[in-house]
Image (cartoon, helix red, strand yellow):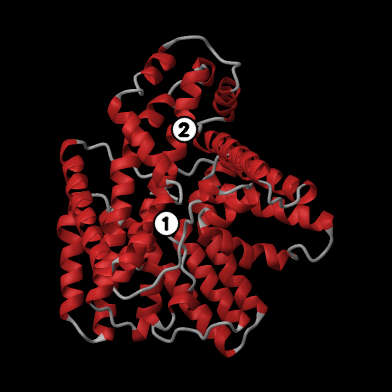
Amino acid sequence: MVFSSYIFLCFFLPAVLLLHMAVKNTDIRNVLLVMASLLFYAYGEPCYVLLLLISVAVNYFAGRALDKNPKKPVLACAVVFNVGVLFVFKYLDFFFVKTGLRLPIGISFYTFQALSYTIDVYRGRVKAQKSFRDLLLYISFFPQLIAGPIVKYADIENQLKTRNPGTADIKDGLLRFSAGLGKKILIANVMAKTADTLFNFKGSEFGLLSAWVAAVAYLFQIYFDFSGYSDMAIGLGRMFGFRFQENFDHPYTAGSITGFWRKWHISLTSWFRDYLYIPLGGNRKGRARTIINRYIVFALTGLWHGANWTFLVWGLWHGSFMMLERLGTKKSESRVLKAIGHIYTLLVVTAGFVIFRADTLGQAFGIIKAMFGFGAKGGAAYAFALGFFRPYSIMILLLAIIGAGNVPKKMFARMKEKSEAGSELLAMCASLLVLILCMSALAVNSYNPFIYFRF
């Protein structure tokens, strides 16, 4: 079940939210949310609910044991179990033999949450959760179960017991949810049609126009799809009294690849920093070790997204540019240099996402080569790309460019400063309009892909 579906929007969410509002006892609310989350997961993966429960149980007992006596062998067993399950279902086919196992929905996200909980208990940063139900809620909570953000236990430990959502929380949550839904359905889905069609062509069939249309369409598809989903997850969490950390901060406005990764998929970046990069030594053991550590992190960041050479190369691509920035650049206040930095960052990110999206490295480098004028002339890819320049597609592209920047955020902030009541009314009207447009779009178009659905 995805958030941008009729069954979720018209049945699941209203039912769960109304029941949650009707119940005032937090323990009963937690039981309700656990049942709803397992039902939500079972709708898409009934055969893997047991795997999710086993994962929670192993980390629950590991946490209790580590809370009493933080021994490394216990932590090692928990880490081996979590990584082992992820490896079997996600990477065994890639590295060894074809198993035919279907990838469980959201396994990368809930495994990382479970790992962070167990490691933090070992480190003494949090106390072990004594209630199996509440730990199950933390790991399986449906807003962030299948596509994040990756929530650290320390961030919501108290909220599991002390939250008391009111009307303002529900209102703010609905506003955030509708904004994310609009990103997903009104922008990402439109871009997806163009990107998915063009990436079906061979790399050798791309010319200058088709390569750039494919690259730009996917650049905006992945951002508005994933950030839209994160907005929906944050909004849903707010409706039920949970405050999740932000996962995106307008990454396409960054002036460097280092800055991009401070703004893109923040929960994953911070996870790798806290649980891999710093334990490896971070930048504390000299330049050579720092370079090695960063490459390890980015290689695993790439593989986290999927078992394919394209993901590995995408991670190393970003890691290489980050190392070049660290070794050879200094921050400048010059407007010209800032503009150049921004253009350079967008070029690197765009080319990187071509590698990320391509089916093979050959296709990826064929498209990148064509982006710089070394591609085919004419052909079917060119004809399709030319059809992208219709009024509706151009309007959505302009909306995407504006939405990916800081302008909307600054505009609403100024409106809020001038008139609280007026800005709230405007926001509510805008959200209602977005919901109507999204429901209409879903009614007339069944094309509703979700990039991170099986990560």
Residue shown at 57%/64% (left/top)? Answer: 271
Secondary element under disc 2, as helix, strand or loop, is helix
Q: Amino acid at mark 1?
A: Lys
Q: Nearer the viewer, residue 359 or 322?
A: 322
Q: Nearer the viewer, residue 252 or 106?
A: 252
Secondary element under disc 1, as helix, strand or loop, is helix
**Numbered circle sitting on residue 353:** none
Is the residue 48 above or below the residue 113 in the image?
above
Estimate the x, y position of residue 155 in percent, counting from the top left. Answer: 47, 76
**Numbered circle sitting on residue 216:** 2
Quarter residue 412 falls in: bottom left
Residue shown at 66%/78% (left/top)? Answer: 72
Is the residue 408 above or below the residue 15 in the image?
above
Q: Is residue 49 visible?
A: no
Q: Is residue 160 visible?
A: yes
> Which residue occupies the extreme bottom position in the image?
68
Estimate the x, y position of residue 31 in percent, counting from the top left. Answer: 26, 78
Left or right of residue 305: residue 395: left
Left or right of residue 35: residue 404: right
Q: Which residue is mark 1?
A: 410
> Which residue occupies the extreme front position in the image?
418
Residue shown at 63%/63% (left/top)? Answer: 273
Q: Residues within 10 Å of mark 1 (few under 14, many from 20)?
A: few
